[in-house]
Amino acid sequence: MRKAPAPLRQITVWLNGNSIAVMEGAMASSAFLAAGIPCRISVDGEPRTALCGMGICFDCRATVDGVAHRRTCQTPCREGMRIETQR
Amino acid sequence: MTRHAEVLIIGAGPAGLAAATAAANAGARVTLLDDNVGPGGQIWRGGTPCAASPQNSARETALREFRGSKASLLTGRRVADAPEPHVLRAFVEETGIVESFTWDRLILATGARERFLPFPGWTLPGVFGAGGLQALVKGGYSVEGKRVVVAGTGPLLLAVAVHLQQYGAKVITVAEQASLRALLPFAVKLSSHPGKLVQGARYRAALRGVPYRTGCWPVSAEGIDRLTAVRLSDGKKSWTEACDLLACGFHLVPNTELASLLGCKLVDDFVAVGPTQQTSIESIYCVGEPTGIAGVDAALIQGRIAGLAATNKTEEAKTLFKKRDREQAFGKRLDRAFALRAELRSLAQPDTIVCRCEDVRYSQLHSQQSWTDAKLQTRCGMGPCQGRVCGPAVQTLFGWRNSSIRPPLFPIPLSALVPATTPASNEITQLQETV
């Protein structure tokens, strides 16, 4: 099994208003997935998370620092970043 | 802001990197654009520091040679439209602005994406693309201790299973829809590509103890608000595998949207190219998966050929034709071996969502006559992905082809298109709604 090379800096992001620790450089999509929180709620009200991981499907889109429709699989986390489920 | 490149290349995967290196070493001013945060495309996607990828010598060599050339790389650029000949505009998500690029020669290396097919439960959290889950893990998602079923079709499944296992996932089974009978001729022919044979054998060895079931496919993903199990079938019986994650993709489809927008001719869904990778438009070349799904080795040679041809080094390019043709023949064998079985077209139930952006269900679609009909009547394919996911799905299910590609190729905020003095808006433009 592969171990991440230490030491890596942990940073704090705000996920739907709650602070969580993530590794610096991790994509915002991974914060949603680790927390088990959907990136967006679909037209019919279904919870959705990332599907394609490569910026094509837009199912991982969420609100990042107040900007809607950001593809979280292409958005690296930064200290203090606010990411929110898009409804 | 406008920049000029003698050779402009779209896509920094293996094909684009090889093209850029060859063209820059021939003395051209080369700019390479990519939507991702770093070079490598999908197959060579670099991990974030917290999920560093294993060393890959082909990748390291290509990146080193690229950095040794004078080509410049601009990442985070999503090409959105071509407002006039020899001009492309790209949206920079990071800054919210649109940049313009003028070019003398253009090389399209836009790669491929996974084909997704709808089945009950495929929209549940916990269901990912196969390459999709691999990319998300490289983006920092930890799968340590997770029970994963890998399903679908194509050589990618084994690579994904090995990768996930390296990151601590427990791979329960790999379900390959192609039958053993379809795969055997392909496996036998691999002996003429020793490198690929060795890699395949390494993957199998790494997955010791994990069943690789051929002629086996997912029929439903189960769970209430997240995945808890996958139902698999081998045509005779079906059974349930309890799992946390499903990594499921049905081989690859080419990203031909930009080539179509520019007016390049397509044949059988792929960009038509001549011996030097030139498209039906003289100043535009196309390399890698958009010309036929043939893998990284074909992409590297095609990229080099186009980089040379675009800088008038045709004689040198010609020396690579034979090797390229051999790799392309490998791609044809891939297509045959991993052809989709008919059963996959009847997995979707009436209430199964087909278009994930607009939540359009199978029952709304099966009475439509065409892709255009479906768009007008149901909004299928009219959400932010612009049919990139449901398009290949409905083509498989109903035989409809997406007949019109219009700008912008990706949704971009109105604020990026209006002068800076106007109050900013982050609304997604409705221009994406094309029929």
Image: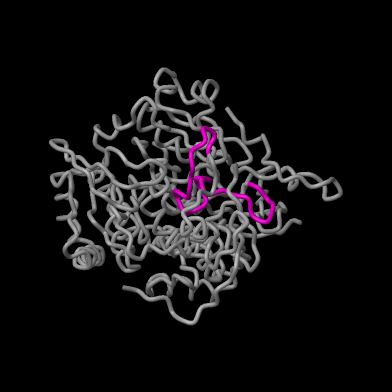
Residue B325: percent from left, percent from top: 32, 54
> Is residue B315 something one can see in this rendering?
no
> Is residue B275 something one can see in this rendering?
yes
Magenta span dominant secondary structure: loop
Start and end of the magenta stretch?
Answer: A42-68
Residue B244 appears left or right of B433:
left
Residue B267 appears left or right of B425:
left
Residue B132: percent from left, percent from top: 41, 53
Residue B429 appears left or right of B57:
right
Vertical order, B342 against B229 (above or below): above
Residue B170: percent from left, percent from top: 27, 62
Is residue B284 one of those drawn in magenta?
no
- What colour scheme governs how the chains and residues are painted in the rendered image of this protein? one colour
Residue B399 appears left or right of B8:
left
Vertical order, B258 against B403 (above or below): below
Vertical order, B344 against A34 (above or below): above
Q: Nearer the viewer, residue A43 or B217?
A: A43
Which residue is found at the position 40% from the left and 55% from the top? B133
Vertical order, B46 against B410 (above or below): below
What is the number of callouts on the image? 0
Is residue A49 one of those drawn in magenta?
yes
Hey, which quadrant is residue B352 in on the image? top left
